[in-house]
């Protein structure tokens, strides 16, 4: 049953009504045709959202229908009906707390453009970027000026790298250079003391992207050394292959999505720069193993890990983003259709499940950034922006409306207004990333 069982419902009656009135009405309030993920339709009027369900008026009676089972376009429409677009967005020339630039494209979210991306980046950097003597880094919280290091610092550096990919500006190139120079000065170039393989992988990704932007050979050399170190210590024949997450917690810590998909992302960045065929082959082997052990090829969902208790863990948007990025990178390098099909399945799984991404984790928790970056890149590389643009826009609107207006920063839960306490830079990262990647000029229609 698609309609919740606690109400007296007749799904067959809904679809009978849909067959009598097949014409799709304009996307607005009132009666229109609605479609589920299986392409079955009915006519009714959207009334409200009640928990996980949208409630429709059909033939004079109310019917709740699970939001997760609507098709993507109708989920986005319901979100927009519940949350009308704002009449103003911040001017890039103004203080980040201002909201003076008005919409100029009726019916299309005015947030996915370069001016808005500039303003959101400026707000985040005003809140968290610190320049101290010769050091440039993102600090821990609004009130705590200590540097974010290792994997957290690496993930935050990628925001500046996203900004450079969007603008190709000298200012953003310099910011990436300053951030990565400080990172290497503080973290060194020998990372084998960090036994968490996923920590090292995120550090490699930030450094390799930094190398591709700045040309600093230290970033490349450090990343190649670290990649080979992680592979040599992390890959073995337990569970037929794969990379352990924590070398101090084998086997209990398991071989995780967190320690395998980012290994491919970092390896493929190295391959792009060095054309190292051995690293490409190892990335393909890691993917083949992960696809068997960590990926549900029927649904597109990801397991957290495989370990002594078998396949365990939740269906995690963070892992979905890493998988999507890895699969797309391999497809771009090899043009093997299987990688593309897997990437598409994983992307659609998340988009169809979540009309708006949200997570209640705080402190050292980021949630949406990996998926948003991966999906935007997948769209750019495969000319898919038209398919996913409405979903991006709905999420951008939700994140913007959930911001704390004194700072224009937003936490991980894009369905609730951000607390005005001492937010961490990490929990506020994802919205800033979203606006950078959805404004990439390589996306058809982005500007």
Image (tube, rainbow, N blue to C red):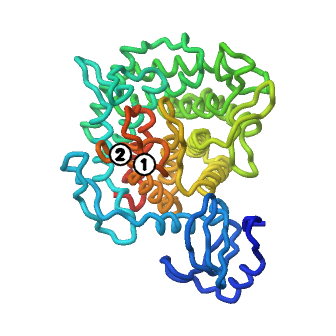
Residue nearest the viewer, comparing 178 with 132:
132
Which residue is drawn at the image coordinates 27% and 36% (left, top)?
126
Disc 1 versus disc 2: distance between alpha carbons?
A: 7 Å
User: Which quadrant holds residue 142?
Assistant: top left
Do the numbered discs 1 and 2 sit on residues whose CB atoms are within 8 Å? Answer: yes
Residue 261 picture location, percent across and down: 62, 34
Residue nearest the viewer, comparing 220 with 400:
400
Q: Could you tell me which quadrant the N terminus lies in?
A: bottom right
Residue corresponding to mark 1: 417
Residue 64 picture location, percent across and down: 66, 68
Which residue is drawn at the image coordinates 36% and 33% (left, top)?
213
Instruction: Using a 10 Å C-alpha cutoff, classify the residue at mark 2 as few (fewer than 14 neighbours), some (14 to 19) or many (20 or more).
Output: some
Disc on the earlier residue, 1 or 2: 2
Which residue is drawn at the image coordinates 72% and 16% (left, top)?
250
Q: Could you tell me which quadrant the C terminus lies in?
A: bottom left
**336 shown above or below 32:** above
Q: Is residue 168 visible?
A: no
Q: Is residue 190 visible?
A: yes
Where disc 1 sits, the SS reads loop
Where disc 2 sits, the SS reads loop
Residue 243 picture location, percent across and down: 68, 24
């Amino acid at each position: 049953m698609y309609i919740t069982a606690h109400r007296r419902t007749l799904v067959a009656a809904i679809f009978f009504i849909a067959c009598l009135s097949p014409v799709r009405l304009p996307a607005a309030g009132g009666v229109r045709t609605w479609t589920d993920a299986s392409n079955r339709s009915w006519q009714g009027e959207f009334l409200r959202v009640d928990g996980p369900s949208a409630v429709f008026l059909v033939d004079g009676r109310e019917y709740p229908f699970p939001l997760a089972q609507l098709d993507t376009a109708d989920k986005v429409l319901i979100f927009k009906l519940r949350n009308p677009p704002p009449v103003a967005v911040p001017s890039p020339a103004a203080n980040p707390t201002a909201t003076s630039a008005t919409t100029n494209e009726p019916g299309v979210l005015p947030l996915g453009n370069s001016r808005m991306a500039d303003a959101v980046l400026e707000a985040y950097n005003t809140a968290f970027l610190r320049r101290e003597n010769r050091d440039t880094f993102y600090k821990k919280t609004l009130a705590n000026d200590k540097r974010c290091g290792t994997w957290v610092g690496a993930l935050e550096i990628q925001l500046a790298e996203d900004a450079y990919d969007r603008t190709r500006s000298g200012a953003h190139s310099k910011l990436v250079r300053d951030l990565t120079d400080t990172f290497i000065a503080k973290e060194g170039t020998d990372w084998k003391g960090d036994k968490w393989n996923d920590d090292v992988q995120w550090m490699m990704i930030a450094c390799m992207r930094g190398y591709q932007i700045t040309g600093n050979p230290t970033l490349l050399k450090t990343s190649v050394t670290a990649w080979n170190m992680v592979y040599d210590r992390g890959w073995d024949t337990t569970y037929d292959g794969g990379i352990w997450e924590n070398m101090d917690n084998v086997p209990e810590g398991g071989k995780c999505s967190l320690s395998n998909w980012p290994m491919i992302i970092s390896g493929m960045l190295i391959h792009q720069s060095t054309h190292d065929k051995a690293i490409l082959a190892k990335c393909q082997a890691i993917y083949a193993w992960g696809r068997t052990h960590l990926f549900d090829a029927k649904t597109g969902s990801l397991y957290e890990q495989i370990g002594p208790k078998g396949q365990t863990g939740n269906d995690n948007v963070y892992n979905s983003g890493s998988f999507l990025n890895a699969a797309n990178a391999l497809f771009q390098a090899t043009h093997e259709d299987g990688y593309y099909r897997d990437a598409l399945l994983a992307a659609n799984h998340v988009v169809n499940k979540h009309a708006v991404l949200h997570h209640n984790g705080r402190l050292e928790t980021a949630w949406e950034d990996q998926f948003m970056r991966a999906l935007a890149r997948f769209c750019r590389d495969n000319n898919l922006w038209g398919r996913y643009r409405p979903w991006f826009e709905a999420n951008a609107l939700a994140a913007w409306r959930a911001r704390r207006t004194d700072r224009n920063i937003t936490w991980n839960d894009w369905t609730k207004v951000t607390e005005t306490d001492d937010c961490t830079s990490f929990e506020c990262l994802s919205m800033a990333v979203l606006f950078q990647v959805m404004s990439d000029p390589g996306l058809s229609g982005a500007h």
